[in-house]
Image (cartoon, rainbow, N blue to C red):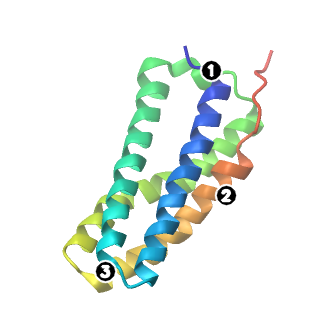
Amino acid sequence: MLSPGTVILTLKILVGAVTVLLVASLVALAAGKPRWHGRINTVFFALTAATVLGFELVIRLLQPALTAGFTAEQREALAVHLTFALPAAVMLPAMLFTGRREYKTAHRLMASVFLVLWAGTFVTGVFFLPHTFEPTP
């Protein structure tokens, strides 16, 4: 059975891991390797989608009481994180589509917004969510 602390730690690890992929895709793009940029972003998309769907499945269906022990501060931190993470996740299919179709103007415009959202996702996910979890009594 999952604990709230395990969920938060897993979230932090996964956000960090996919951020490494995002940086690698931007490095590939800067190096003039758009094909590698696309390949890495496809993996980034798949892992991010799996993470979002996995967490939704666990928190909403399998163990809905999992976050019941969160303090008000922990709930607020999670809400702020989701304010960035959910819009970023929603943008991913459109980003993948415009990138694959080479709709460069639309892709670059969305990429600008996405990078701001992802920066917020990273900062709030890694630094603002609690590093340890102590349930409320």
**Left or right of 101, for residue 52:** right
Of the two numbered discs 1 and 2 on the same chain, state the one appearing first in sequence.
1
* In-image side of 40 versus 80 (left or right): left
At a point 63% along the width and 27% down the height, the residue shown is 6
Give the amino acid type for the residue marked by disc 3 in the picture.
Answer: Ala
Q: Residue at x 43, y 42 (%)?
A: 52
Q: Residue at x 56, y 53 (%)?
A: 83
Up/down of 10 relative to 27, above or below: above
Q: Which residue is mark 3?
A: 106
In whole angstroms, how far apart are the C-alphas of marks 3 and 2?
26 Å
The residue where tag 2 is placed is 123
**In front of the other: 69 or 54:** 54
Are there few (<14), some (14-19), or many (20+) residues within 10 Å of tag 3?
few
* C-beta proximity under 8 Å, tags 1 and 3: no
Q: Amino acid at mark 1?
A: Ser
Q: Earlier in the sequence, mark 3 or mark 2?
A: 3
Decide: marks 3, 2 in contact (CB < 8 A)? no
Task: Compute the Cα span from label 1 to label 2.
Answer: 23 Å
Q: Secondary structure at mark 1?
A: loop
Mark nearest the camera among 3 and 2 is 2
Q: Give the residue number, with chain letter if any, for mark 1.
A: 3
Tell me the quadrant of the picture where the C terminus can be found. Answer: top right
The answer to which quarter of the image holds residue 90 is bottom left
Q: Quadrant of residue 12?
A: top right
Query: In the structure shown, which secondary structural element does the residue marked by tag 2 occupy?
Result: helix
Q: Residues within 10 Å of mark 2 (few under 14, many from 20)?
A: some
Q: Position of residue 91 (x, y in %)?
A: 37, 62
Of all residues, the one furthest to the left in this rendering is 101
